[in-house]
């Protein structure tokens, strides 16, 4: 399985887990449906959207999102205006970001165990994105 497919599957699993936990959240439901389509037709778009609009961004305090995830810093979910600062017109990219935004919305409603599981998903997503970037840098040399 390629890095892109692994990444897409992990992102889908996270969205599906959150959608099951918050079935009333229409954005999560739509994110799952959008991810299902993108996984089949254009999984690279998911990776590129995540890298451009999540992985490479910094928080309002100036810390990179990568560092906030590694440190398990709740600032990532509590003090972030991800969608406002990264307004996007592309529906495919919006699917990825709306899912992350929904996690932000529900962060306070999650148990400590559920939060730990979200951090683990994000660890994997950030690790796969980092490997993807490294592979592309090495291929372009």
Image (spheres, helix red, strand yellow):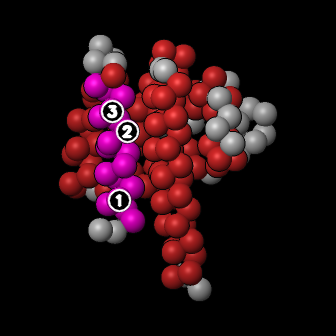
Q: Position of residue 1 (x, y in %)?
A: 29, 68
Residue 14, which numbered label? 2
Specify which label sits upstream in the sequence, 2 or 1: 1
Q: Residue at x 52, y 67 (%)?
A: 131
Q: Are marks 3 and 2 in contact (CB under 8 Å)?
A: yes
What residue lies at 51% left-to-right and 74% top-to-bottom? 136
Question: What's the CA distance linking mark 3 and mark 1?
Answer: 16 Å
Q: Which portion, as a residue range, is magenta?
A: 3-20
Determine which residue is flagged by label 1. 6
What kind of element bears circle 1? Answer: helix
Residue 114 shows in the view: yes
Query: What's the distance in space between the residues labelled 2 and 1, CA to CA?
Result: 12 Å
Residue highlighted by disc 3:
17
- For the point 49% across and 44% down, which residue is it? 120
Q: Is residue 140 magenta?
A: no
Q: Position of residue 19 (x, y in %)?
A: 31, 26
Q: Is residue 95 above or below residue 81?
A: below
Helix, strand or loop at disc 2?
Answer: helix
């Amino acid at each position: 399985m390629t890095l892109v497919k692994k990444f897409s599957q992990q992102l889908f699993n996270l969205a599906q887990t959150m959608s099951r936990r918050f079935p009333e959240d229409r954005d999560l439901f739509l994110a799952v449906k959008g991810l299902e389509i993108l996984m089949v037709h254009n999984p690279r778009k998911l990776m590129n959207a995540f890298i451009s609009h999540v992985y490479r961004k910094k928080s309002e305090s100036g810390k990179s999102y990568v560092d906030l995830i590694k440190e398990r810093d709740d600032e990532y979910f509590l003090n972030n205006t991800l969608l406002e600062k990264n307004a996007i017109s592309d529906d495919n990219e919006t699917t990825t970001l709306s899912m992350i935004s929904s996690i932000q919305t529900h962060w306070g409603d999650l148990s400590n165990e559920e939060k730990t599981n979200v951090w683990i998903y994000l660890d994997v997503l950030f690790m796969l994105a980092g490997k993807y970037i490294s592979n592309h840098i090495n291929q372009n040399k």
